[in-house]
Amino acid sequence: MEGSKCEVCGELKDVVVAGVPYIAYSASFCATCLKSNAIPYFLAVSNTAAIGGLQNADDGWKDIVTCTINLLGKSLEEFTIDVSSWQTELPADDISF
Ligand SMILES: [Zn+2]
């Protein structure tokens, strides 16, 4: 059996489907990513944007974000830029929850 694409690191490996903490979404994780506490990058960015930035996150979410950017070799600055560009793409009065 050939592997599937891990949604966190993007590599073709044996993956398992697991729920993403904090988010109603199931993603494919390879064993390394599942153990690392990292999640798919776009989810880390979009969910952080949805709560108005990392300063509004609890420790558990901050930890997930840290693990995710460390695993992907991104800096916190890059992540913050991605979050703010995500926020500007959202129409402000279109948030209904
Ligand atoms: Zn992976």
Image: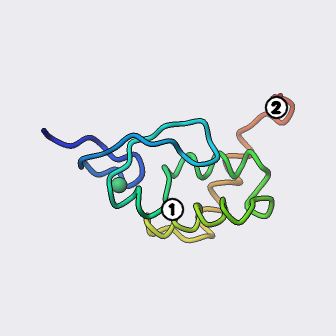
**What percent of the width, then of the height, locates residue 93?**
87, 31
Q: Nearer the viewer, residue 43 or 23?
A: 23
Which sits earlier in the primary sequence, circle 2 or circle 1? Answer: 1
Horizontal side of 17 relative to 44 (left or right) equals left
Q: Nearer the viewer, residue 13 or 69?
A: 13
Q: CA distance from mark 2 to mark 1?
A: 26 Å
In the depicted structure, whether residue 76 falls above or below residue 47 = below
Q: Residues within 10 Å of mark 1 (few under 14, many from 20)?
A: many
**Residue 28 occupies which quadrant of the picture?**
top left
Circle 1 SS class: helix
Q: Can you identify the residue that label 1 sits on?
A: 68
Horizontal side of 4 relative to 42 (left or right) equals left
Q: Residue at x 61, y 51 (%)?
A: 45
Amino acid type of the residue tagged 1 in the rendering: Thr
Q: Residues within 10 Å of mark 2 (few under 14, many from 20)?
A: few
In the depicted structure, whether residue 50 falls above or below residue 93 = below
Q: What quarter of the picture does the C terminus occupy?
A: top right
Give the total of numbered labels. Answer: 2
Horizontal side of 77 relative to 30 (left or right) equals right
Q: Residue at x 26, y 40 (%)?
A: 4
Q: Classify the position of ligand 1 by quadrant: top left, top right, bottom left or bottom right.
A: bottom left
**Residue 82 occupies which quadrant of the picture?**
bottom right
Amino acid type of the residue tagged 2 in the rendering: Phe
Residue 83, label in figure: none
Q: Is mark 1 within 8 Å of ligand 1?
A: no
Q: Residue at x 21, y 43 (%)?
A: 3
**Residue 20 occupies which quadrant of the picture?**
top right
Q: Can you identify the residue that label 2 sits on?
A: 97
